[in-house]
Image (cartoon, rainbow, N blue to C red):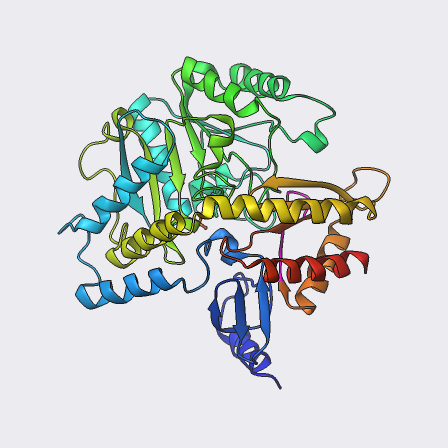
Amino acid sequence: MSLSEDLHKRRLAAVARGVGSVVNSYIDSAGGATLTDVDGREWIDFASGIAVTSVGNAAPRVVQAVRDQVERFTHTCFMVAPYESYVAVCEQLIALTPGTFEKRAALFNSGAEAVENAVKIARHATGRQAVVVFDHAYHGRTNLTMALTAKNMPYKHRFGPFAPEVYRAPMSYPLRDGGLDGAEAARRAIDVIEKQVGAGNVAAVLIEPIQGEGGFVVPAPGFLPAVAAWSSANGAVFVADEIQTGFARTGHWFAGEHEGLEPDLVTTAKGMGGGLPIAGVVGRADLMDAVHAGGLGGTYGGNPVACAAALAAIETMRELDLVAAARHIEAVLVPALRTLASSAPEVAEVRGRGAMIAIEIVEPGGLTPDPVRTAAINKACHDAGLLTLTCGTYGNVLRFLPPLVISDEDLQRGIDILARAIRG
Ligand SMILES: *Cc1c(COP(=O)(O)O)cnc(C)c1O
């Protein structure tokens, strides 16, 4: 029996079945864009722990910063006895997010917690309750964020009742929109909001600039600016959930920049911490500061070790120009995938930005999703040592999220494995 098989046996007897894993190889060490499992098998990483290790696995600066911090102190609780690194991370969030208006930030532990707090802030600041979200949205697994998330299986099934005052509008999904352009798709969404919710009731309009778990859906140009403009004209807080798209992943610091968005609030997590759990809400000072002292926070939010890691990750992104690296990955990956798609009729679309790229798999000749073939390609990649993920409302999207520090050689090795997996 391999060491992974052995561990898997222990896991089945100890870890709740509701917590799944994409592969059954147990990891021993990792560096850059590769993982090594306990049996010594090497994996090329096209997952980054779900868009987290953008600076690479065990990035040297992050490792050193964490080491230095744990030796100084591990925890005081910022709400009890504050420290500099929390302030410095907030300063970075303010500097890096779009918009030159006055901003404030607050730190949390997970993406779901950041989203929950953005909703708290928007409701408090506006005195309104309704939150508008979109088809295919993913915002987390806590009670409020399950309500905000679109997909039933596996995220919501039998976990209700869900939080009230959440309303869903149609998304712009160019492949499946029958030719609607961005302005038309925005009009369709705004109609639903005005007719079913009422403009004056909307506290927040919450959207991922490129949807993550929902299928790497890139809305048609003009959709996001139109929805943001409507929010601003109607006194609703426009919240960009940049938890998966943020921190250089899409070839800008934040994905909203591709369309000139200046969201009222931005939620961040994932890539921000270089692998340590940290999240943030950053945005307009008048909204953020509307909440009374003690109304936001948590025991661990902005933990000093996580803050040290985030500062080191951001420094690494600047030093290695990982915004440019993400664009380079797109420039290599997308043409290779398009070439593959030209002789693979089941690949309906290659889409995404930067190092957030996906292919959607359908039954040839139409747009019927083919989740079975998608799972088979994904499995073939895993069998050949490439760690890929699926996503999408219909489970028919293969997504690629390599660390931004991946070498051209590893990127090409990954593409070669993928090509063989698709050709069967
Ligand atoms: C992952 C994700 C979340 C939830 O983050 P967690 O840290 O898993 O709670 C929320 N929104 C988006 C867009 C995400 O990709």
Query: For this rendering, which residue is in front, 413 or 128?
Result: 413
**On screen, residue 291 above or below 310:** above
Residue 269 x, y percent position in the rendering: 40, 47
Is the magenta region chiefly helix, strand or loop?
A: loop
Q: Position of residue 283 (x, y in %)?
A: 32, 31
**Magenta-drawn stretch contains 80:** no
Residue 265 visible from this viewpoint? yes
Q: Residue at x 57, y 78 (%)?
A: 4
- Is residue 355 shown to the viewer in this render? no
The residue at the far bottom in this view is 1
Q: Is residue 208 above or below residue 347?
A: above
Which of the 4 image quarters holds residue 296?
A: top left
The quarter of the image holding the C terminus is bottom right
| Percent position of residue 222, x then y | 57, 21
Q: Which residues are magenta?
A: 387-396
Q: Nearer the viewer, residue 348 or 144?
A: 348
Does the magenta segment cover residue 392?
A: yes
The quarter in which the N terminus is drawn is: bottom right
